[in-house]
Amino acid sequence: MTATATRVLVLNSGSSSVKYQLIDMNDGTRLAVGLVERIGEQTSRLAHTPLAAGGDKRETEGAIADHDAALKAVAAELAADGLGLDSPQLAAIGHRVVHGGLKFTEPTVIDDAVLKEIERLVPVAPLHNPANITGIRTAQAMRPDLPQVAVFDTAFHATMPEYAARYAIDVETADAHRIRRYGFHGTSHAYVSRKTAALLGKDPSEVNVIVLHLGNGASASAVAGGRCVDTSMGLTPLEGLVMGTRSGDIDPAVTFHLKRVAGMSTDEIDALLNKKSGLIGLCGDNDMREIRRRIDEGDERARLAFDIYIHRLKKYIGAYSAVLGRVDAVAFTAGVGENAAPVREAAVAGLEEMGMAVDASLNAVRSDEPRLISPEYARVAVAVVPTDEELEIAQQTYALVNA
């Protein structure tokens, strides 16, 4: 890496998509952002925006066979803007990897041994790690000389004490099959908890924060002095809050009941709980905007789905208040958390005795900046803190290759 290499390409490879950002670490400026979706279909789409050149978004459609072809198409778009992968200014490529297990608790330079370990974790992340691996291999083939860094969704939660991470099942069975609570959305929880402390004018080590990452996938974390001590997702991203299509917490015996009484297979139950539950299972919609529109029109099914969603949120806020002992802030983030004022208002309503309240006028403000939405008298700050997982991945990647 040259002394002038200050750029990091962040890749988030999904099963049929690649999201990417090219960031200059001198000041965190986005030079380009984009998305390739529907990889493997005839109607693949690449949307690329060259922010550095002030250019307009470019969109192309056509068959993109696989991730290799997708990354080559991304490289061509970047090269057209003078930002090619062969640039001496490119310091590293940072990859989002969903599951790092117990082994990977820090950003890690990827070599053959690391890649094999990520592959070994596929059974506990069958929907995510294979796509992450494909993206890594493709990027390695394109720039074998460049540091490739894995940043793990699970890493921030590795500080959970054993009594929070362990399930109460037979220890030998749990250890043999790596069954424990790992947590996810870790890059977001890390970023937002630090930003919340900064918003309060304090060092992260001085602040206890409950972070509510509310998107189509949703998770909560209890962060004490900058360290995660509990989080809502577990062995997989299915546990915890009610989500767009995932059930969240459920009696494990429901699965036995569905198998024995309904005759459903393991794969059918898996699909039910991960893809046909949560908000979409309750009311047929997983878009909070649409659910609120239906509520305003008097739709009782949408109202019940919303109430169940909020009830689960309140339970976690209360539980994590008990875990932390002292709460300095509750931070809402991600698509729903940042944009759905009714969710924030309802989640905190009735918690005044716990020191939490929302100011209606502040809550109604729309902004891309971190902001407080609680009244001055509130003992606990309630904040909206836009997440930036790509910047967090870039910062961790750049810090590692410059260490």
Image: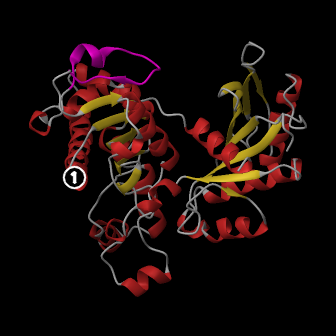
Please state the horizontal and vertical placement of residue 15, each as a whole percent of the image: 65, 50
Dividing the picture into quadrants, the one containing residue 333 is top left
Q: Report the magenta residues as a range.
A: 358-375
Please state the horizontal and vertical placement of residue 29, each as a whole percent of the image: 67, 24
**Where 167 sits versus 96, above or below?**
below
On-image quarter of the N terminus: top right
**Which sits in the foreground, 153 or 272?**
153
* Residue 399 placement, left or right of 81: left
Total number of numbered discs in the rendering: 1
Mark 1 sits on what residue?
319
* Residue 112 placement, left or right of 165: right
Q: Is residue 155 magenta?
A: no
**Which sits in the foreground, 119 or 106?**
106
**Which sits in the foreground, 64 or 388?**
388
**Which sits in the foreground, 303 or 193?**
193
* Three-letter code for the amino acid on which mark 1 is drawn: Ala
Please state the horizontal and vertical placement of residue 205, each as a whole percent of the image: 39, 46
- Whether residue 285 is visible here, answered yes or no, is no
* Residue 381 placement, left or right of 277: left
Residue found at the far left of this picture: 353
- Whether residue 160 is visible here, answered yes or no, is yes
- Residue appearing at x 62%, y 58% in the figure: 129
**Where 258 sits versus 298, above or below?**
below
- Residue appearing at x 20%, y 21% in the figure: 376
* Dominant SS type (magenta): loop
